[in-house]
Image (cartoon, rainbow, N blue to C red):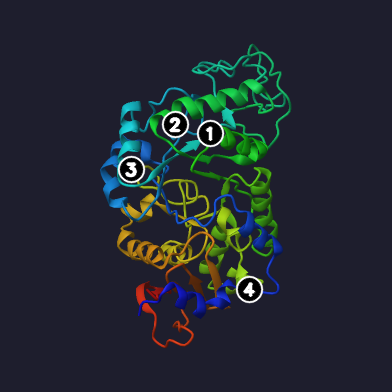
Amino acid sequence: MKFTSAAVALAFAVLAAPSADASPIYHLARRDNNYGARTDVLIQAFHWNSWQTAPWYNTIATNAPQLKGLFTLAWFPPPSDAGSNEGYLPRRWNVLTSKYGTADQLKAAVQAVKANGLQAVADIVINHRVGSTKWNDYTEPAFADNNAATTSDDEVWKQPGYGTPTGHPDTGLPYTAGRDLDFTNPSVQDTVTAWMTNTLKAVGFTGWRYDFVRGYAPSYVGQFNAKTSPVFSVGELWADLDVNNPSAHRNQLLDWVKGTGSNSAAFDFTTKGMLNQAVASNNYAILAQNNAPVGLIGTAPGYAVTFVDNHDTGASPGGTGGQKLWQFPVGAEMQGYAYILTHPGIPSVYWPHYFDQKMKAAIDPLLKARKAAGVNSLSHIRIDKAANNVYAAYIAGTVGSLAVKLGPADWTPSCPGSAGAYKPVGSGTNWAVWSSV
């Protein structure tokens, strides 16, 4: 049964009404969200071992047509020459030939995803950098003063013969594998902005994923976004999670977003961690807090980029199987996707899950149902059950609504005043999704 927008609004008015105990930050974020109600879905178009499939950029370009109409954003690996195979120890920012392919192959891959309706998001690694032959000889581009561009408290550089860093103290956490850059230095700020504007945007990138944002003050992300005007921005703030106190973890993410001037989204590591725990322990009650989702999507959904795994947390084809630093319970990944692809926030899909582990057939119907129902980053949600063996919720879109169930217990949706209005979208072990459209 297909609902009109008016019928959906009437039937699910309860979803739009804030609960009495909901966080006031939640409603403030909904009013003032710079991003608005976004319908974006991101695909991480690489994994930890992608560089071993050379040129990886050709793999992206070849598969781009399969993403058309399903995804709106494609997250590319770090694009610059680097001292590490994966690109996370950047060396020469302006040189776009890397282990993933040549500069021309990168440009072709960016154009391929754009031709299929996706915006290209670059992995921005700016917290740290390595020299061309030693600690401090940054080239292509150099800074006005390479010594002054490095923080005075860099934990490794102080080696005989390499000079002394003369920058200001670090504005964030140290990163021992590379030299920490001093973002208070105008030359560093200008050089980063020039690289993003004159090199990356020239290739066709229109969005940014900021790596290791714990390494520098969030205000700089806000500053770089103000100067480069990305269509999408997300920061990686990965902190330790106490599953018994998820609010503290979530609030770190929220504070970071506010620190950018509310000018960037953040990966919702709280939702990721609590989903991991809920599925692993068969305790789905922990997914709800104060009648709202427990993660960042429960307090500032428009700024939350949800995910099941990424290049750090999950497995990767090739080599020793990737990093697997915080892997989702193996074999249960579709429970995670059933959750994030029905819920508010901006969901992200991991390339190996989609292509290599053959989850595309199960994920695509969920993507289509999300789009058909008009579910977006700010969609209202009503959690119907959150217990040890079941989690169930309704999510209201602009056209219809979705219903989702996780866990081994039985649960089926019902629509107020319209019995049998929902039809199945997809299901598997311990998960099911329905749509009213």
Q: Which mark is residue 291?
A: 4
Q: Are marks 4 and 1 in contact (CB under 8 Å)?
A: no
In this figure, which residue is indicated by the disc labeled 2? Answer: 201
Q: Mark 1 to mark 3: distance in Å? A: 21 Å
* 124 horizontally vs 187: left or right: left
Quarter of the image where the N terminus is located: bottom left
Q: Nearer the viewer, mark 2 or mark 4?
A: 2
**Image depth: mark 1 or mark 3 in front:** 1
Mark whose residue sits in front, 4 or 1? 1
In the picture of the structure, the residue carrying the numbered disc 1 is 228
Per the model, the C-alpha gap separating discs 2 and 3 is: 15 Å
Left or right: 206, with 17 as reference point: left
**86 vs 13: above or below:** above
Determine whether the residue tagged by mark 2 lies in a helix, strand or loop: helix
Q: Secondary structure at mark 3?
A: helix
Mark 4–mark 1 Cα distance, whole angstroms, equals 38 Å
Per the model, the C-alpha gap separating discs 2 and 4 is 42 Å
Query: Residue 30's x, y, as percent?
Result: 61, 59
Q: Are marks 1 and 3 in contact (CB under 8 Å)?
A: no
- Residue that appears at 37% across and 40% down: 50
Q: Quadrant of residue 102?
A: top left
| Sequence-wise first label, 4 or 1 | 1
One can see residue 333 in this view: yes
Q: Earlier in the sequence, mark 2 or mark 4?
A: 2
Q: Residue at 50%, 34% (x, y): give it.
A: 88
Question: To which residue does mark 3 refer?
Answer: 113
Quote the CA–CA distance across marks 2 and 1: 9 Å
Residue 373 x/y as whole percent = 41, 68
Mark toward the start of the polypeptide (4 vs 3)? 3
